[in-house]
Image (cartoon, grey):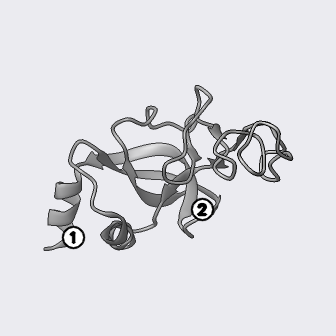
Amino acid sequence: METFYRVHWADCLPFSAEHAWSALWGATRVTPDGSRIECIACGGTGTADGTKYGDPCAECDGDKVTDAERGYSCYTNPTDLIAYFAHRGEPSDDDSVIVFEGRQVGAGSDGETLAVPTRVIETMTWSELRKRENR
Protein backbone atom coordinates (compact mmCIF):
# COMPACT_ATOMS: atom_id res chain seq x y z
CA MET A 1 0.00 0.00 0.00
CA GLU A 2 1.11 3.55 -0.73
CA THR A 3 0.57 6.70 1.33
CA PHE A 4 -1.42 9.59 -0.16
CA TYR A 5 -2.35 13.17 0.80
CA ARG A 6 -5.72 14.67 -0.07
CA VAL A 7 -7.78 17.77 0.67
CA HIS A 8 -11.26 16.51 1.51
CA TRP A 9 -13.86 19.26 1.26
CA ALA A 10 -16.25 19.77 4.17
CA ASP A 11 -19.26 19.38 1.85
CA CYS A 12 -18.06 16.08 0.33
CA LEU A 13 -19.51 12.70 1.14
CA PRO A 14 -17.73 10.98 4.06
CA PHE A 15 -14.21 9.84 3.22
CA SER A 16 -14.35 6.12 2.35
CA ALA A 17 -13.53 3.61 -0.38
CA GLU A 18 -17.23 3.55 -1.29
CA HIS A 19 -17.25 7.31 -2.00
CA ALA A 20 -13.83 7.45 -3.70
CA TRP A 21 -14.85 9.21 -6.93
CA SER A 22 -13.25 12.24 -8.54
CA ALA A 23 -14.94 14.87 -10.68
CA LEU A 24 -13.81 18.02 -12.44
CA TRP A 25 -13.95 21.28 -10.48
CA GLY A 26 -17.51 22.58 -10.38
CA ALA A 27 -19.16 19.29 -11.39
CA THR A 28 -22.54 18.47 -9.86
CA ARG A 29 -22.81 14.95 -8.48
CA VAL A 30 -26.12 13.29 -9.28
CA THR A 31 -25.90 9.91 -7.49
CA PRO A 32 -25.82 9.29 -3.74
CA ASP A 33 -22.36 7.67 -3.89
CA GLY A 34 -20.87 10.41 -6.11
CA SER A 35 -20.06 8.05 -8.99
CA ARG A 36 -22.09 9.96 -11.61
CA ILE A 37 -21.96 13.67 -12.42
CA GLU A 38 -23.93 16.09 -14.56
CA CYS A 39 -22.28 16.20 -17.97
CA ILE A 40 -19.95 19.19 -18.11
CA ALA A 41 -19.67 19.19 -21.90
CA CYS A 42 -23.38 19.93 -22.42
CA GLY A 43 -24.22 21.46 -19.05
CA GLY A 44 -26.62 18.62 -18.35
CA THR A 45 -28.86 19.37 -21.33
CA GLY A 46 -27.99 16.18 -23.20
CA THR A 47 -27.50 18.03 -26.48
CA ALA A 48 -24.36 19.13 -28.29
CA ASP A 49 -25.53 22.74 -28.65
CA GLY A 50 -27.23 23.00 -25.25
CA THR A 51 -30.70 23.42 -26.74
CA LYS A 52 -33.76 21.25 -26.27
CA TYR A 53 -33.70 19.89 -29.84
CA GLY A 54 -29.99 19.70 -30.71
CA ASP A 55 -27.99 16.60 -31.61
CA PRO A 56 -27.06 14.34 -28.66
CA CYS A 57 -23.96 15.39 -26.72
CA ALA A 58 -20.93 13.32 -27.74
CA GLU A 59 -19.71 13.13 -24.14
CA CYS A 60 -22.86 11.74 -22.50
CA ASP A 61 -24.71 10.41 -25.57
CA GLY A 62 -27.72 12.52 -24.58
CA ASP A 63 -28.03 10.96 -21.10
CA LYS A 64 -27.15 14.29 -19.39
CA VAL A 65 -24.77 12.53 -16.96
CA THR A 66 -21.32 10.92 -17.14
CA ASP A 67 -19.25 8.74 -14.85
CA ALA A 68 -16.93 10.34 -12.33
CA GLU A 69 -13.39 8.96 -12.24
CA ARG A 70 -12.74 6.15 -9.75
CA GLY A 71 -10.50 7.17 -6.87
CA TYR A 72 -9.87 10.30 -4.85
CA SER A 73 -7.69 13.05 -6.30
CA CYS A 74 -4.54 13.05 -4.19
CA TYR A 75 -0.75 13.29 -4.17
CA THR A 76 1.96 10.97 -2.85
CA ASN A 77 3.58 13.71 -0.76
CA PRO A 78 2.53 16.90 1.00
CA THR A 79 4.83 19.12 -1.08
CA ASP A 80 3.00 18.30 -4.31
CA LEU A 81 -0.40 18.79 -2.64
CA ILE A 82 0.66 22.24 -1.43
CA ALA A 83 2.05 23.13 -4.87
CA TYR A 84 -1.24 22.12 -6.55
CA PHE A 85 -3.28 24.38 -4.28
CA ALA A 86 -0.86 27.27 -4.76
CA HIS A 87 -2.45 27.55 -8.24
CA ARG A 88 -6.04 26.84 -7.15
CA GLY A 89 -6.22 28.84 -3.94
CA GLU A 90 -5.62 27.38 -0.52
CA PRO A 91 -8.37 25.40 1.20
CA SER A 92 -9.90 26.67 4.42
CA ASP A 93 -9.51 24.96 7.75
CA ASP A 94 -13.15 23.86 7.49
CA ASP A 95 -11.87 21.31 4.98
CA SER A 96 -9.58 18.44 5.98
CA VAL A 97 -6.24 17.15 4.83
CA ILE A 98 -6.38 13.38 5.00
CA VAL A 99 -3.27 11.21 4.93
CA PHE A 100 -4.24 7.69 3.95
CA GLU A 101 -3.02 4.35 2.73
CA GLY A 102 -4.54 3.01 -0.42
CA ARG A 103 -4.00 1.82 -3.94
CA GLN A 104 -3.50 3.97 -7.00
CA VAL A 105 -6.17 3.34 -9.65
CA GLY A 106 -5.32 5.95 -12.27
CA ALA A 107 -4.60 9.60 -13.00
CA GLY A 108 -7.08 12.48 -12.94
CA SER A 109 -7.77 15.25 -15.40
CA ASP A 110 -5.19 17.54 -13.75
CA GLY A 111 -2.55 14.80 -13.83
CA GLU A 112 -3.02 14.06 -10.14
CA THR A 113 -3.04 10.54 -8.71
CA LEU A 114 -6.39 8.83 -8.20
CA ALA A 115 -6.44 6.40 -5.29
CA VAL A 116 -8.92 4.31 -3.33
CA PRO A 117 -8.28 4.37 0.43
CA THR A 118 -7.83 1.35 2.65
CA ARG A 119 -6.91 3.10 5.92
CA VAL A 120 -6.80 6.67 7.25
CA ILE A 121 -3.45 7.44 8.84
CA GLU A 122 -4.09 11.02 9.95
CA THR A 123 -6.47 13.95 9.53
CA MET A 124 -5.44 17.58 9.97
CA THR A 125 -6.32 21.11 8.88
CA TRP A 126 -4.66 22.87 5.96
CA SER A 127 -2.95 25.24 8.43
CA GLU A 128 -1.50 22.29 10.33
CA LEU A 129 -0.14 20.78 7.13
CA ARG A 130 1.41 24.11 6.09
CA LYS A 131 2.97 24.61 9.52
CA ARG A 132 4.44 21.11 9.47
CA GLU A 133 5.84 21.53 5.96
CA ASN A 134 7.37 24.96 6.68
CA ARG A 135 9.61 23.71 9.49
Q: Nearer the viewer, residue 135 or 81?
A: 81
Label 2 vs label 1, nearer the camera? 2
Q: Nearer the viewer, residue 36 or 129?
A: 36
Residue 28 placement: quadrant:
top right
Q: Residue at x 45, y 67 (%)?
A: 76
Quickly name the residue at label 1: 133
Residue 111 placement: quadrant:
bottom right
| SS of the residue under disc 1 | helix
Percent across and percent down for residue 3 are: 45, 59
Quickly name the residue at label 2: 108
Q: Residue at x 27, y 60 (%)?
A: 90
- Which residue of the protein is positioned furthest toward the top in this rendering? 32
Q: Earlier in the sequence, mark 2 or mark 1?
A: 2
Could you give the CA–CA distance between mark 2 and mark 1, rounded to whole angstroms? 25 Å
Residue 77 lies, with reference to residue 61, above or below; the image says: below
Q: Determine whether label 2 and label 1 are within 8 Å by CB.
A: no
Q: Nearer the viewer, residue 62 or 8?
A: 62
Neighbour tally class for label 1: few under 14, some 14-19, many 20 plus, Cα within 10 Å: few
| SS of the residue under disc 2 | loop
* Position of the N terminus by quadrant: bottom right
Q: Is residue 91 left or right of residue 1?
A: left
Percent across and percent down for residue 11 are: 37, 35
Q: Nearer the viewer, residue 78 or 62?
A: 62
Percent across and percent down for residue 104 are: 60, 59
Q: Amino acid at mark 2?
A: Gly
Residue 47 — which label? Answer: none
* Position of the C terminus by quadrant: bottom left
Neighbour tally class for label 2: few under 14, some 14-19, many 20 plus, Cα within 10 Å: some
Q: Amino acid at mark 1?
A: Glu
Total number of numbered labels?
2
Q: Residue at x 23, y 55 (%)?
A: 126
